[in-house]
Image (cartoon, rainbow, N blue to C red):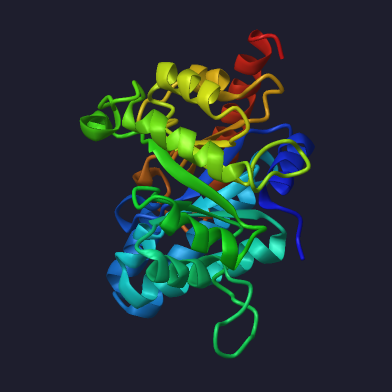
C-alpha cells in the first residue's frame, strides 16, 4: 500500500523545490515539423501512436527535473482513437517506470455505480476481473463534483490512497456563467464546491496536514483563488491556465497557503510547445525540443519560486 497521494505530492515538491505540474496534451498539428512530415509520409494508426509517444517521452525527459508531476489530459488521446489510447497507455507506463506522479485530467463522474466504474478504470490497483495490476492507474484524477457526495464516495473507496481534484473554479472565460452565481447562503457555486471538497477531504487527511482531496482552481482568477483558499485551507490546489491561457503566478501565490505547499501550477502548452514547429524540421528535433522544453519548465519553476519568496516565503 502506498502513502496517500497528497503526502507524495508534498514530498516531491520539497525534493525538487517546485510547484510545477507539466501537462501532456499532444496535438499533432503543432508538433515539430519533422514529426508532422513523418505522419504525412506514412499516415497510419501505428505511426500516430509512435509519434505521440515519442514526443511525450521527449517532454517528460526534458522537464522531469523541474516538475512535481505530469498531467495527461485524456481528451487529447481519445481524439485519435485507438492509436491515441495506446500512446496514453505507453505514456502512463513510462511515467510509472520513472517514478513520476501521474495526475490524469479526465474530469470524470456520474451516478454512484457509474462513478465506481470510472474509479475502477483510472484509480483501481487491479483489473476488476483478472486481479492483475491495472496499467491505466493514475496517482490522482480530476473529477466533477456536480453530483454531490454520491458521486465522490466511489472514488474515495476504490483507492483511498489516490488523490482527487474536484472542479471548483475553472480557468475558462465562461466559467462564471454558473460558477460565480450566488447561492442563498452567500457562497458562489465555486465557493460552495470548495466547501464541500473541504468537508470530503477532512476524512482523508495526509500526514503532511493536507487533504487527499483537492480542488481545481484556474490561475486566471487570483482573487477567487484567495477566497477559495480561505474556504478550503487544507485542500491542495491544482491550478491550470498558466501560460497560453494567461494565468497569473500571483494566483498561485495567493493559493499557496502559509507553508507555500498548497498550490500547484499546471502548464501544458507553455511547457510542451515553447518552439515554432517549423524550426524543428530535421531529424535532430529531439535535442532542440528538449532544450526549449527544459528551459521553459525551469523558467516557470523559478518564476513561481520568486513570487513565493516575494510574499515572505
Residue 143 visible here: yes
Q: In this view, which residue lies farthest toward the bottom?
A: 130
- Give the image location of residue 305, x and y in percent: 65, 21
Q: Nearer the viewer, residue 153 or 39?
A: 153
Q: Is residue 76 above or below residue 17?
A: below
Residue 292 visible here: no
- Give the image location of residue 253, x and y in percent: 57, 19
Residue at 39 percent of width and 50 percent of height: 148
- Give the image location of residue 272, x and y in percent: 47, 45
Residue at 44 percent of width and 31 percent of height: 242
Q: Nearer the viewer, residue 299 or 139?
A: 139
Q: Quadrant of the N terminus?
A: bottom right
Q: Nearer the viewer, residue 52 or 39?
A: 52
Q: Nearer the viewer, residue 25 or 261?
A: 261
Q: Is residue 282 above or below residue 268?
A: below
Residue at 47 percent of width and 39 percent of height: 196
Left/right placement of residue 94 relative to residue 76 reads right
Residue at 24 percent of width and 34 percent of height: 178
Q: Quadrant of the C terminus?
A: top right
- Give the image location of residue 51, x and y in percent: 43, 66
Determine the image quadrant of residue 131.
bottom right
Determine the image quadrant of residue 173.
top left
Amino acid at each position: 500500500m502506498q502513502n496517500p497521494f497528497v503526502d507524495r505530492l508534498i514530498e516531491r515538491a520539497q525534493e525538487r523545490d517546485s510547484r510545477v505540474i507539466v501537462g501532456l496534451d499532444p496535438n499533432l498539428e503543432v508538433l515539430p515539423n519533422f514529426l508532422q512530415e513523418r505522419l504525412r509520409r506514412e499516415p497510419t494508426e501505428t505511426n500516430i501512436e509512435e509519434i505521440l509517444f515519442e514526443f511525450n517521452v521527449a517532454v517528460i525527459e526534458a522537464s522531469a527535473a523541474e516538475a512535481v508531476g505530469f498531467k495527461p489530459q485524456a481528451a487529447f488521446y481519445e481524439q485519435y482513437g485507438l492509436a491515441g489510447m495506446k500512446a496514453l497507455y505507453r505514456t502512463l507506463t513510462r511515467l510509472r517506470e520513472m517514478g513520476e506522479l501521474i495526475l490524469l485530467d479526465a474530469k470524470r463522474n456520474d451516478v454512484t455505480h457509474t462513478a465506481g466504474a470510472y474509479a475502477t478504470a483510472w484509480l483501481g490497483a487491479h483489473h476488476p476481473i483478472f486481479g492483475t495490476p491495472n496499467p491505466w492507474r493514475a496517482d490522482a484524477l480530476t473529477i466533477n463534483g456536480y453530483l454531490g457526495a454520491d458521486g465522490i464516495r466511489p472514488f474515495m473507496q476504490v483507492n483511498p490512497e489516490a488523490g482527487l481534484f474536484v472542479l471548483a473554479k475553472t480557468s475558462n472565460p465562461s466559467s462564471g456563467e454558473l460558477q460565480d452565481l450566488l447561492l442563498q447562503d452567500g457562497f458562489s457555486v465555486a465557493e460552495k464546491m470548495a466547501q464541500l471538497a473541504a468537508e470530503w477531504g477532512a476524512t482523508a487527511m495526509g500526514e503532511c496536514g493536507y487533504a487527499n482531496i483537492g480542488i481545481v482552481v484556474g490561475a486566471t482568477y487570483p482573487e477567487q483563488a484567495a477566497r477559495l483558499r480561505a474556504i478550503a485551507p487544507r485542500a491542495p490546489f491544482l491550478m491550470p491556465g498558466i501560460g497560453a491561457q494567461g494565468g497569473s503566478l500571483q494566483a498561485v501565490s495567493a493559493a499557496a497557503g502559509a507553508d507555500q505547499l498548497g498550490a500547484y501550477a499546471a502548464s501544458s502548452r507553455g511547457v510542451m510547445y515553447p518552439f515554432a514547429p517549423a524550426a524543428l524540421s530535421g531529424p535532430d528535433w529531439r535535442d532542440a525540443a528538449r532544450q526549449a522544453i527544459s528551459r521553459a519548465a525551469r523558467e516557470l519553476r523559478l518564476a513561481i519560486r520568486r513570487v513565493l519568496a516575494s510574499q515572505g516565503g
